[in-house]
Image (cartoon, rainbow, N blue to C red):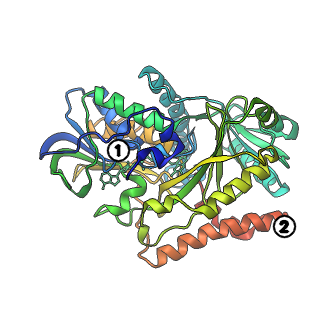
Amino acid sequence: MSSYVDLSWWFESCADDLSPAAPLDKDVAVDVAIVGAGFTGLWTAYYLAKARPDLKIAVLEKEIAGFGASGRNGGWASALFPSSLATLAKGAGRERALAQHAAMRATVDELITVAAAEGIDADVAKGGTIVVARTPTQWRRAVAEVDDARTWGLGEDEMVLLDEATAKVRLNAADTIGATYTPDCAAVHPAKLARGLARVVRKLGVAIYEGTTVTGLAPHLVTTDRGTVTAEFIVRATEGFSASLPGARRAVIPVYSLIIATEPLPASVWDEIGLAERETFSDQRHLIVYGQRTADDRIVFGGRGAPYHFGSAIRPEFDNEPRVFAALRDSIVEMFPVLRDTAITHHWGGPLGIARDWHASVGLDAATGIGWAGGYVGDGVTTTNLAGRTLRDLILGEATDLTSLPWVGHRSRGWEPEPLRWMAVNAGLRAMTVADTEERITRRESLAARVMAPFMGGH
Ligand SMILES: Cc1cc2nc3c(=O)[nH]c(=O)nc-3n(C[C@H](O)[C@H](O)[C@H](O)COP(=O)(O)OP(=O)(O)OC[C@H]3O[C@@H](n4cnc5c(N)ncnc54)[C@H](O)[C@@H]3O)c2cc1C
């Protein structure tokens, strides 16, 4: 990678020196070895080092801290979890499903509190999320979502239905009929958070070896291109990149999410659009889109639509998909016609991880001492913090409220071998695009979307 600054607008604006830290230069022995310096790896290191300053912890990172999805995402620190309450309750019962939901809500505040306490200025604003409905079909979905929330005992303090006038005060998107609003989300600058966290973790005595590629994982042994690391515990924190590691090739697939950023917008445009509290925003379409107003008054707006690449391949050129960037630009101009002449100054993308059953998980195999967390399906900014605290408890052998949550120890089956995987995933992505067009024309719920909906959550 010639210049990490070009990875995302977030990296460009994070005001950090992005030169890689020293790689591993000899064989070492530690208590805990963590593979990957994204949010999962860094939060795990943070909470472990805080709880047990005596532990020797090493993080091994192929590029630089934050290089993966953690330094490139949409910056929604939300309480969203990729599995619905109904899915969680099927396996774990209603009470534990609700415990997972409550843990996610609390984690949004945990992330904000720790960042502030550690002096990490990540441009945080907890303005909640507004999801507008812009067709009658989308409005029916919004109403159904709030009705469903009520059946789980979630009140107006968690999710509320807004009529057209109230919705437009928060976000004045074209064709708005109404919206759902939840206070449980903060807009963050993800690269400032990731780089700040890496700084804090280093100060706590954790060694982060950058420019160090892990080539193999075995019980108590990590092999890299620079030397070996022996450890009592090993954590695989490589999320969307996991398919490149031996032993995890079919665990999660990398699916690309792509983003554009506008130039900073003047006050007159914000008077028109809203987002006075820096609410994160979306609409009820099937092919996920997500936006945030940045601290310097840009819109960062992302979405799916990029193809899945055969063999779970990840390459720098996959971050650049002009067709998707053009569609994203058309989308925000259609939502906010005032942006007609606004310049798009940046675009980028990256892979997020999806397990075969779309279920995020965290766990530690007691027999091998190998732990993992991932499969966040684009809802990882907050979930990684919960994963980090849970891995701390699992590694320290403590049974806590966190270790009894239903995602702990969940095992998803592996993805199909190619070419089946490629055909099925791309068919799903295409179905969502077709469904949105179909609904705009017919104004009825698309059948394809109904079939695929449970599989298309997250960012
Ligand atoms: C474009 C985009 C937008 C998103 N938007 C949101 C959002 O708004 N809200 C939200 O909640 N989630 C969002 N997500 C998802 C979220 O960013 C991820 O779930 C989260 O950052 C995952 O963190 P992680 O640490 O598990 O993985 P990553 O941040 O991907 O980190 C994995 C690290 O492992 C390293 N690595 C890989 N292979 C090796 C190896 N062999 N040896 C050593 N190191 C290795 C990588 O270089 C990388 O740094 C988005 C994701 C993308 C891509």
At a point 26% along the width and 54% down the height, the residue shown is 213
Q: Which amino acid type is marked by label 2?
A: Ile
SS at badge 1: loop
- Label 2 neighbourhood size at 10 Å, few (<14), some (14-19), many (20+)? few
The quarter holding residue 275 reads top right
**Of residues 356 and 367, the one drawn nearer to the viewer in this rendering:** 356
Q: Earlier in the sequence, mark 1 or mark 2?
A: 1
Residue 441 is tagged as 2
Q: Is residue 437 above or below residue 155?
A: below
Rendering coords of residue 58 (x, y %):
23, 40
The residue indicated by pointer 1 is 64
**Of residues 410 and 389, the one drawn nearer to the viewer in this rendering:** 389
Q: Is residue 161 visible to the viewer in this orientation of the structure?
A: yes
Q: Is residue 326 above or below residue 422?
A: above
SS at badge 2: helix
Q: Is residue 406 visible to the viewer in this orientation of the structure?
A: no
- Label 1 neighbourhood size at 10 Å, few (<14), some (14-19), many (20+)? many
Q: Which amino acid type is marked by label 1?
A: Ile
At a point 34% along the width and 50% down the height, the residue shown is 372
For residue 242, side relative to residue 438 (left or right): left
* CA distance separating discs 1 and 2: 46 Å
Mark 2 CB in 8 Å range of ligand 1?
no
Rendering coords of residue 326 (x, y %):
67, 59
